[in-house]
Image: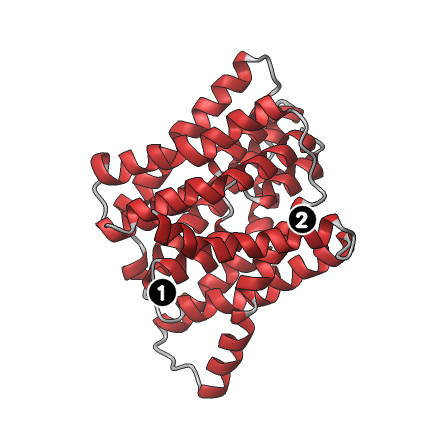
Amino acid sequence: MLPVFLETLPFFALIGLGYVAGRSGFFPEDATAWLTRFVFYFALSAMLFRFSSNLSLGALFDWNFIAAYLLGSGAIYLLATGVAIARRLSVEEAAIEAQCAVIGNVGFLGIPMLTLLLGEQAVGPVMMVLACDLIVFGSLIVVLITGGRDGRMRPAVLLSVGRGLVKNPMIMSILAGLAWSALSLPIPGPMESFLTTLGAAATPGALFAIGASLASKSAERLAVAGWLSFSKLVLHPAAVALGALVLFPVDRYAAGVMIACASLPVAGNVYILAQHYGVAPHRVSASILVSTAFSIVTVSTVIAWVAQF
């Protein structure tokens, strides 16, 4: 446990550095926004393209993997929704809380950290988790919030969801890389160097941006934030482990990566959605802050366990 904790510590130290820089005002909110944009559209996209261009769709796509992840995540999504409804919250608030319970920071934290700690071969399973989160749950929350407000489902909502997926650079860079791989095209040396250099900025940039963005988060509604953080850090990886190791047996290594992804803290894009739709942004903000703080211990524990796989 201690060796793994020491290995994960530099990643969280980078988050802490960003937090201090943001909290002190040395790195203001607009600077954080621009750094996040650079990482999201350029550095992380370069890393994902380079990784996926060395994969094949056949090796990446695994029905058991998808079923195990969606079953485990779906169970916690329904649990969080049920708890929210029992507290007499609206459909929109229930959808936001359920999103907090299952959507981890796979893009900005999982990809750089897990590929370094568990090996570059972890990128395939990480991409599958990321795709499920973006395509399934990312679409579901838009449908639930919009449908809950309108009282019905309009075709325009589905069109909006489709446009959002097409505009997402992580999805498009993965698809572009897989297309490059399917065409069996070699990556020229200068292009490889360019992608490697740009992609190398993703890890420090993403982690620093996470910390800096946390500096502006509030710690209100701590009881709810504690429940949602417990769901995300403990219940979610436990449910996914049950799905991957018992119900839909997945390759042990891929299962370990999937469980590690499920153990990550609440993703920042949930806050962006909450703010965009005006649904419980302070509650989501507190959940991100609390889950990230406790993940220093919980993520290290989960990675130490799955590393044995």
Q: Residue at x 40, y 30 (%)?
A: 235
Using residue 11 as the reference point, say whether residue 67 is left or right of it. Answer: left
Give the mark, 1 or 2, whose residue is nearer the N terminus: 1
Front-most of residues 4 and 111 = 4
Q: Residue at x 56, y 24 (%)?
A: 94
Secondary structure beneath label 2: helix
Q: Position of residue 188 (x, y in %)?
A: 44, 86
Q: Position of residue 70 (x, y in %)?
A: 37, 38
Residue that label 2 marks: 213
**Is 292 situated above or below 175?**
above
Q: Position of residue 265 (x, y in %)?
A: 50, 41
Rendered image quadrant of residue 271: top right
Front-most of residues 136 and 15 = 15
Amino acid type at image mark 1:
Glu
**Is 189 situated above or below 28?**
below
Front-most of residues 246 and 145 = 246
Using residue 135 as the reference point, say whether residue 143 is left or right of it. Answer: right
Residue that label 1 marks: 120
Secondary structure beneath label 1: helix
**Is 143 situated above or below 3?**
above
Q: Position of residue 277 (x, y in %)?
A: 69, 35
Q: Residue at x 21, y 35 (%)?
A: 246
Task: Count how many numbered circles sit on residues in the image.
Answer: 2
Q: How is the image coloured?
A: secondary structure
Neighbour class for label 2 at 10 Å: few (<14), some, many (≥20)?
many
Q: Residue at x 54, y 19 (%)?
A: 84
Amino acid type at image mark 2:
Ser
Using residue 292 as the reference point, say whether residue 278 is left or right of it. Answer: right
Q: Residue furthest front?
A: 2
